[in-house]
Amino acid sequence: MNADRIIEQCRELVTQPLSAVAERWQAAHPGGRTVAVYPVWAPAEVIHAAGMLPLALLGGGTSVELTHADARFQSFVCSIAKSSLELGFQGLVKGVDGFVYSNICDVARNLSSIYARNFPDVFVEYLHLPQNSTSPGVAGYAAAEFRRLADGFARTWGLQVTPTALAKSIEVYNLLRARIRALYALRIAEPQKLSTSELYVILRAATVVPPEQSTAWLDTLLAELPAREARPRDRLRVVIEGAFCEQPPLGLLEVLEEAGCYVVEDDLMLGWRWFTSDVATDGDPFERLGAAYVNQAVPSSTRHEGREHRSAGLIEKVRRSRADAVVFMPAKFCEPALFDYVLMKQGLERAGIPHLLVEFEEKMWTFERTRNEIETFVESMLFD
Amino acid sequence: MAAPVTERQYQGKVHEHSRRLMSVWMDELGRAEAEHQATGALMISGNCVELLRACHILPMFPEVTALQNAIRHKSLPLILKAEQAGYSSDNCAYVKADIGLFLEGGMGPGKPIPFPTITVCNYVGCNVYVKWFEHLADVSGSKLFMLDVPFGRTAEPTPADVQYVVGQLKELIALCESVSGKKFDIDELREILAHAARAEEGYSRCKHLTKRHPAPFDSYFDSINMMGPINVLRGTPEAAEFFDVAVAEFEGLVAQGLGPLSEERFRTVIEGPPPYPFYKSFRNLFSKWGAVAVQSTYSTVGGIWEWGFRHDPRRPLESIAEQMLTENLTNRSIVARYGQIKRYVEEWEADALVIHSIKSCRLFSAGQGDMRDYFTKQLGVPTLMVESDLEDPRYYAEAQIKNRIDAFFESLEHKKVVAAAH
């Protein structure tokens, strides 16, 4: 399969409900189980090491009409929380055996226990991911939390996560993450050869297939894309920040590019590329994952980093990707992104980096106003 | 037609006593800078105020500043100031009022509210706490200590959870020593914890007195007088004595058969923080129906003392960790809160549940529709849900709220009449 065919297949895969993905996996792996991870991150390695298929639970997007969840969550709550719950009510996650939530925000925390109450027949686990990044006990605590997740799999389904299996899964995901990093590097170097809407669907599709399969896709993409014929255009190089949980509509990403931007860095689909370098391959694998969580995690609005200012990670991304500006793209009602916007924009202004704020909602379907805002921003930068 | 319900003329000591104690603390804060007194910002929920006290760090609570500004109708200009600086209309208004105070020049050197010397984020459930204190440390330049408390996701905290928190408390002690220049004394902490336990016992006794008919005070609107001493001043002998006075006063009211209203027609449990900018108006909407809150969840944000937990001077750091981990509302799941409310409804013999859903605090409110579903459909408890905000007056629509409250109590009254006829 060539690169274009892979991207086409990824586009098709991301339109399928999670139930179709899970049931297809179970048909091919009788007795097999699937566990979906709510954004932003959970150790997919632990799920994989138990012999299950890790999936990403990314809400209902534009595909699901809220008929139950609106009565459970108020109007001022983000859409992804409601649509994720709605998927359960409408049977659109049938075949998904378990869900993992974590302390990314107050809404996600409440959603976790409400999901468990409404769907008592599925496995629901809530991970407390440390917010203290500097105390000596943090890495060990994170490792214990990942062991607790594994114990839950053993208790519920009798699926053991052995150290050998987890070590192997870490290697599998290291390979995948390394390729994703390479794809991001390619986009920084030659953004005309890989659009962000393409990169997004590739990464999103990687969350619904086994990591071995997505790694093989990425090998092909990395081999073929550099040879793609594409003429560089006079566009603004931008970093997208704030879209780490609720998913922006594909149309919005396309509009951003059509309006004159090359997106050269972003915080989309962080969960499958959470570590900035390979997780160590020697020693206790749970401890290694815990240490990686503390020392190798990407900057994220959902994680407190006590060793640097909130804007430092973003400024580093801008510098590394040679971006001209930042487009803040928080989901409507997303408190972590909206709070961080203030400290980040102050940091950018101190560093002389222009920025634009564009809020979105997963159900958004008209983009003309946004197109107009972005075009104006781009023109003001390009013709300054 | 039933006689109109009126508020009893309040002649007790609790309100004034609380106000006096809190004023003393606020005055101390106002003098801290001039007296070179180290201060430490803390959050109310599941806090470790005893530890700061033992380290000779004067505690300060941005939430208290924010609510005081709201109740004095001063919050909106501060919120708008923060929104001008880039904060979203969808962000917690408590934070915006606090940052707005800084932007307005009402906080910092030479001001009644000083900058904290250290900012101790007791991350107990609420993720906004993390953001708030990151921002507070940023504007004040103070050292931020992130005290990560694992959320209550298992039936009981694991020994590893307790040890994880205790380890961080020890680091915090070292930080406090470096700030205050004074050596930490574990025996001093034990003494402070003994005062804390005495206050906790008193608060618990007060709250159990509202099981009586009529309840001697409103456990939502009047509890605010006790929440200052229990959450801010806990660990001082003055707070412990305050609760001795409160218990005596409320026991006296019970003996006389007096409640806060001329007649207690409905007993409610109220869930969620109050709308501070409209505290009295909101209360009046219930009072006219003879509705008294016999229990409330908001009064347990700092600690749930009525189930028996007390700080233990024999296990000082461990018991502080346990309280932060489990014995407060915010570090427990919303569904665990259903259990807390269910117990209140049953043991305090409430007629109804009132959910005051506020936009600012998603920890409290996100998913309260599910809570309503559980209480109405599964338990058959009449439940009313109204929406506004605890800090931002723009979200309080009195006419709409009044309509809903009136309709709800009319319906409850009708049910009572029908039940009495059968």
Image (cartoon, coloured by chain):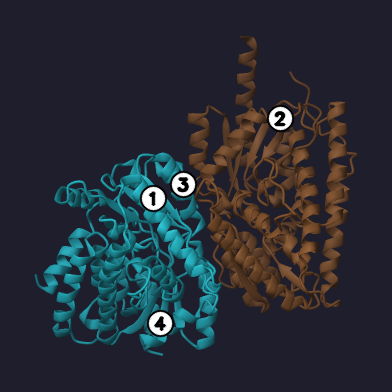
Chain colours: A cyan, B brown
CB atoms of marks 1 and 4 within 8 Å: no
Q: Residue furthest top?
A: B422
Q: On the image, which quarter does residue A211 sit in?
A: bottom left
Please name the amino acid that badge 3 sits on: Ser
Front position among marks 3 and 2: 3
CB atoms of marks 3 and 1 within 8 Å: no
Q: Relative to the observer, which residue lies in front, A120 or A108? A: A120
Q: Is residue B199 above or below residue A317?
A: above
Please check whether the numbered discs 3 and 2 fall on a single chain: no
Residue designated by label 4? A317
Give the number of callouts: 4
Compute the Cα span from label 1 to label 2. 49 Å
Front position among marks 4 and 2: 4
**Image point (28%, 87%), residue name:** A234
Residue designated by label 2? B289
The location of residue B210, given as percent across then percent down, is 75, 33
Q: Is residue B314 above or below residue B299?
A: below
